[in-house]
Amino acid sequence: MSKATIISVAAATMIVGLSALGHSGKAMAATPLTTVRVASGLSRPLFIGAAPGDNQRLFIVEQYSGKIKILANGSVQAAPFIDIHSLITTAGNEQGLLGLAFHPDYANNGFFFVDYTDTSGATVIERFHVSPNPDSADPASGQIILRIAQPYSNHNGGMIAFGPNDGYLYVGMGDGGLGGDPENRAQNPDSLLGKILRIDIDGGSPYAIPTSNPYYGKNSPRPEIWAMGVRNPWRYSFDKSTADLYIADVGQNSWEEIDFQPANDTGGENYGWRLMEGNHCYNPPTNCDPGGNLVLPIYEYGHSSGKCSITGGYVYRGCAIPDLQGTYFFGDYCSGQIWSFRYSGGIMSEFMERTVELAPGGGQSINMITSFGQDNAGEIYIVDQGGEIFKIVPDGVASGCSFNCGDIDANGTINLLDISFLINFLYRNGPAPMNLNDADVNHSGSINILDVAYLINFLYKSGSNPVCA
C-alpha cells in the first residue's frame, strides 16, 4: 500500500469523531407502527444503550441487581457485563444503579461510566474498564470521578451521556428529594443538586472543567454547572443528527415538562424549578419570574387520567421507518402512555399519542416505562420496569433499511464512519459488520486494509463504486 494511502487511513481515523450522520428530513406517508419484544426476564431494567461503533450488542442496566447485562443475537447473556451490587444501595425506590455511558473512544480505551447511589445514599459517577473479554468488564478497575451527597433517597437523577459535539460528560442531578425542594437546592448556585453538569473526564484527574462552561473559573456558581432549575431530569438525550438536547423533567404534583437546548448552546439556562413547575408558578405561587430570565419548557402535560411521571426518550434517526426521521418519542411511567412530536425552529408539529399503535399484542403489554433507548443505527427501544424491553418497528410493511455494499455500520449511508468501523474491526478488536459481505468493497473475497483504501478512494478521490459479493 502506498504512503499516501496510509496517510489517508490515519487522517480518516483521526477525524472520524467530527463527522455527522446524514439523514433525510423529507416528509413521507405515515408508516403503521408496532413494537416487538426483544428481551424479557430482567430485574427492574431502566436503561438500554449501545457502545460506540458496536452494532451487535446492547447493554441493559438493572436498577436493584447492580448488573449491566448484554443483549446479543436475540437473547440476554447469562453472565453480566459487570456486577456492582456491593457498591450500591436500593433502600429507596429511586436508588440503585441508574445510568450508563460509554466513552466516545470506547473501542480504543475501553472506558465506560456508571451512575449509582452508594451505600451512604450519595450519587457516584464511577469509571470502569472492559476486560480482555469484550463481554466482561473488570470490576476492580473502578475509579470514582464524582461523588455528590444526597440529603434524601429520591430525586437522584441518574442520566449520564456524552455530548456528541464536544465529547464532555453530561450528568443529570435531581434536586435532592423529599417534596417541593424544601432547601431550594435547584436554585442554589453553590449546590450541584437540581442541575445538569458538564465535565471533561479526559482533561484532568478525576475530571476538569471545560473552559466553555458558563461558570468556568468561578467559585459561585459551581463551575461544573451547565444548566440549573431541574427537579428530577429523568432521561435526556441528544439528537444523533443535530446534537439538540431534549430534557424530560419530572414534576411535583401537577405538571410534567420537556426542556430543550439547541446544538452548540452555551449553557447557563435556568429551567425554573422550584420557582415554577412547568409553565406555572410553584414557589412563590405568583410573580415567580419577575425578570423573565427563566427558560420555559417546549411542552408540558398535567396529571390527569393517571399520568404522573414523565420518561424522556429519543429522536428517531433509524432507517427502518424513514417517515419517522426527526420524531421525538417520550412516555409516562404511571399511565404507560407514549407520545411523539417533531420540533424544529422553535415550532412543535405532528404531536400524537402512540400508545395503542405501539401496543405489542399477543398477550404482551408495555406498562411502567422507565426508559427509552437507542442503538447505533438510530432505532428506538422502550424499557418496561416489569422486566421487558421492546423495539419500535414498522407494522406489516417492509423495513426501510437497505444494507448496501460499503455501508459497513449499517446506518443507511456510506461515509467516514464506515471507514472507522472497518479499521476498528480489522485492527482494534472492534465489532464485526452486521453484514460481512458489505465490507468486502473491492470484491476480493477477503476483508483487509485494501478495503479501507478502496473506501477512502471512493469517498474522497473519485474512486470506483464499492462492489461487494
Image (cartoon, grey):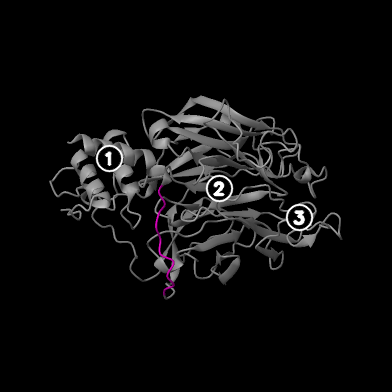
Which residue range is magenta in the image?
19-28
The kind of secondary structure element at disc 2 is: strand
Q: Is residue 385 visible?
A: no
| Residue located beneath label 1 in the image | 8
Neighbours of disc 2 within 10 Å: few (<14), some (14-19), many (20+): many
- Give the mark nearest the N terminus, 2 or 3: 2
Of residues 287 and 446, the one nearer the viewer is 287
Q: Position of residue 299 (x, y in %)?
A: 65, 64
Question: Label 1, label 2: how many angstroms apart (C-alpha)?
Answer: 42 Å
- Please determine whether, in this image, residue 181 is positioned above or below residue 329: above
Question: Label 1, label 3: how many angstroms apart (C-alpha)?
Answer: 49 Å
Q: Position of residue 340 (x, y in %)?
A: 55, 66
Neighbours of disc 3 within 10 Å: few (<14), some (14-19), many (20+): few
Q: Is residue 12 visible?
A: yes
Q: Indicate which disc residue 293 carries.
A: 3
The kind of secondary structure element at disc 3 is: loop
* Amino acid type for the residue under numbered disc 3: Asn
User: In the displayed structure, does residue 258 sit left or right of residue 102?
Assistant: right
- Please determine whether, in this image, residue 164 is positioned above or below residue 405: above
Residue depicted at x 30% and y 45%: 419
| Residue located beneath label 2 in the image | 46
Of residues 34 and 146, the one nearer the viewer is 146
* Amino acid type for the residue under numbered disc 2: Leu
Residue depth check, mark 1 versus mark 3: number of the one nearer the observer: 1
Of residues 261 and 273, the one nearer the viewer is 261
Residue depicted at x 60% and y 36%: 211
Which quarter of the picture shows residue 398? bottom left
- Give the mark nearest the N terminus, 1 or 3: 1
